[in-house]
Amino acid sequence: MTQKENRRTALVVCLVFAGAILLVGCEKKKPTPPQKPPEKTSVKPAAKPAAKPAPQKPAPQTIATELEGAWVGQELNGPPGDWTLKVSGKHLDATGPDQSHKITLLVSSDTDPKRADLVIQESSDPDSAGKIALGIYKIEANKLTLAVGSPDSKERPSSFEPGDSTRVWVLTKK
């Protein structure tokens, strides 16, 4: 092959490649239609479930100075052994025969019986920590009677009688 023929062959090859590139790159593409913004729809609120009884209001956050100090006594129908309650401001440390708790105590002394909300901060019972137990209390002379419902129960005890979900302590001030 002569030099002239080589150039011609190279030119033909280049033209074939250029044509192929043009054909592939210039295919007619269908234009994408402009997208419509999402339609605004009004969302109706879900139907309200049947009315449940209103939970009892928590006790106002007051400090019961009458509870300040140390109390020692027994849990009625509980395991044998003494319980010690130490109250300082809104802090209550409760130690019993098989349990101990650190509690924030919120009370309302303007009701009869007086109300107490026990916010369990720390507990030897892992199921109780972080929960709230609703209770009632009364003080007669130097005797404290405290009735407390199960942690997270929405029911506050209505009496000072121990029951399935109510624990009762009778303690004397030291």
Image: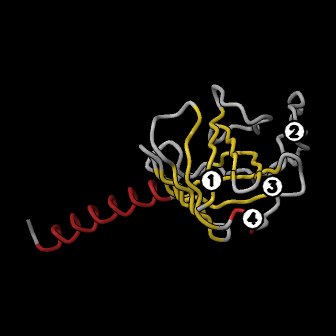
Residue type, numbered disc 4: Glu
Q: Earlier in the sequence, mark 1 or mark 3?
A: 3
- Toward the viewer: 103 or 2? 103
Q: Position of residue 141 (x, y in %)?
A: 75, 55
Residue type, numbered disc 2: Ala
Provide the residue designation for mark 4.
66
Say left or right for 138 vs 148.
right
Given the current orientation, which residue lies at the most extreme front position?
Answer: 141
Pointers 1 and 3 in contact (CB under 8 A)? no
In the image, which is nearer the foreground, mark 4 or mark 1? 1
Rendering colour mode: secondary structure
Task: Calculate the distance from the C-alpha at mark 2 to the C-alpha at mark 4.
Answer: 30 Å
| Dot label at residue 59 | 3
In the image, which is nearer the foreground, mark 2 or mark 4? 4
Label 1 element class: strand
Residue drawn at point x = 89 percent, y = 51 percent? 111
Residue type, numbered disc 3: Ala
Provide the residue designation for mark 2.
54
Q: Quadrant of the C terminus?
A: bottom right
Picture layout, residue 44 above or below residue 174 = above
Pointers 1 and 2 in contact (CB under 8 A)? no
